[in-house]
Amino acid sequence: MLRRKKYAALFMAALVPISLTLSVMSPVSSAAVAPATGPRTGSNWSTWQKDVIGSRFNPQEKQFTEHSVQSLKLKWAFVFPDVDGATSSQPAVVDNTLYVGSRDAKFYALDATTGATKWVFDVTPISGPIDATNTNALRDGPSVVGNKVIFGDYRGYVYALNKDTGALIWATRVSDHALAALTGSPLVHRGRVYIGVSSSEAKASADPGYPCCTFRGQLVALNLATGAVDWRYYTTPQPVLDGTWPDGSPRYAPAGAPVWNSPAIDPISNTVYFGTGQSYSGTTGDHNSVIALDAKTGALRWKQQMNQEDTWTVGCIVPSPQPHCEGLEGGTNLDYDFGASPNVFITPQGRRLVGIGQKSGVYHTFDARTGEIVWQQQVGVPQPNGGWGGVQWGSSFDGKRLYVATWQANPGTLFALDPADGHILWRTPNPANGCSTGGAIAFPSNCNLSHISAVTTTPDLVYEGSADGKMRIYRARDGQVVWEYDTIRQYTGVNGATGSGGSVSGNGGAVVANGMLYVQSGYYSFYGIPGRVLLAFGF
């Protein structure tokens, strides 16, 4: 019993922000645009998962109740430049500043209360100018620790800026592969920055002439003070030339197993957990796996591969002939990767587990120490060649229940699961009228009843947006919708720009901090309704 109480106390401590004093290297100038309106402290949201254990739960946010949310009003909107019809960088909120990246390669610090711009940092002098494919977009969410704000870009660079001025402290490119990208957000723990490396090679492989494939997924640990790489773990062996594809282009294997998501850490054992994507070519490697590493050294502690046969690229969904789709002939073109981030939690019986949702539609849990499978729950119907019916981004744990949302599962559904055994406590489908009401009516070919974004919780409430453009708040005990806002409308931002909302964005979820709710609206037309606004709600 004493041991269980110790575990519980340590996990509760993991929910509290840790303040570190850090040295600053020589900065470059970054102009401030507006002064702060005064500090606000309390329920900060300083990293993508909210905390190192990946709870996406803000226990300190007490202003939001099923009754008080009826008074939520839009306080301000910030309209991003029109790049590709999407938003995706989940903001971090610390005291009175909101930090967020944009697809125009700019990183913004905004006044969290008013939306006024404090400073802007442009990554293009380091990573290069924006090109036709917008490959240096800022898509991940930042982490704020001490005097630093940490984030990555789609060209594989990690940046550390002074959080108050926007001055550059360091920048590190974490992979030498030309198509390396950072889609998962950085996690900071005990002086290190942990970040997964994915790539755009799965998309590039749709080109018949592309020499597919040479990318190796990896998890990288950087020194927080300097940006130097402390260690890296590769998810596949080194690819080698292995014949040719049917179209005559060179074939390299094995390749793939990208790390799309943000990791989570068990602070008791100092173990870092993450999931991997599918193979691009070959069958060797840690694709479709959940991996546990020593957070200090990167040494492997355990791994579990959930689908050994899954070789998929974008070439599998383009019109025939389908280039570089190795799984097509054998039916293993599944795309059942782990796009979601893990949760580390303790069951009512005191057992430490790590859980993670998969695009196969299964939420898996493992013994956090040994990797033994404890329970699995099917929450979505698997749909091969795209993984549409499963869990896309992330789930949340509020100390009582796990909350998991499915993507295009006809319809996408929000679930509450018993953390002890995975029993479904309740399920709430995306409302059937989501595409026939509000702004979605104007987009019949883009609207679908699905959940692209990660789940967020505060005491007694669950937050989940939809591809139908509605942001909804649910009652945690039974899944009843208690608040809904249609984000598909025109906005004039506090920055003077005009633009519209769309599907509630993937790559993150709602952020609830210091009495405010922040929502990114707009996502790719391939997945939903385009848009480009950050919305802030308050009382």
Image: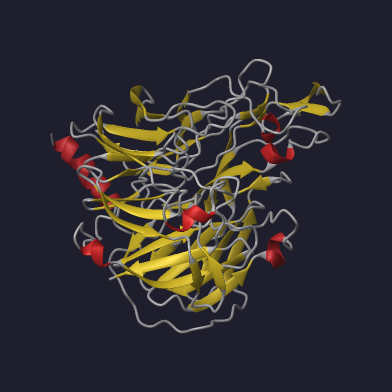
- Residue 376's image quarter? top left
Quarter of the image for the N terminus: give it. Answer: top left
Q: Position of residue 440 (x, y in %)?
A: 48, 54
- Foreground of the two, 444 or 132: 444
Which residue lies at the image location 70% right of the left edge and 23% below the top edge? 326
Q: Position of residue 242 (x, y in %)?
A: 79, 22
Q: Is residue 80 left or right of residue 343?
A: right
Residue 267 can be seen in this image: yes
Which residue lies at the image location 39% right of the left edge and 60% below the top edge? 46
Residue 22 can be seen in this image: no
Q: Position of residue 122 (x, y in %)?
A: 64, 69
Q: How many marks?
A: 0
Q: Is residue 483 above or below residue 196?
A: below
Quarter of the image for the C terminus: give it. Answer: bottom left
- Foreground of the two, 224 or 195: 195
Residue lying at the far left of the rendered structure: 1
Q: Position of residue 351 (x, y in %)?
A: 24, 31
- Foreground of the two, 178 or 168: 178
- Foreground of the two, 465 or 189: 465
Which residue lies at the image location 50% right of the left edge and 61% below the top edge? 501
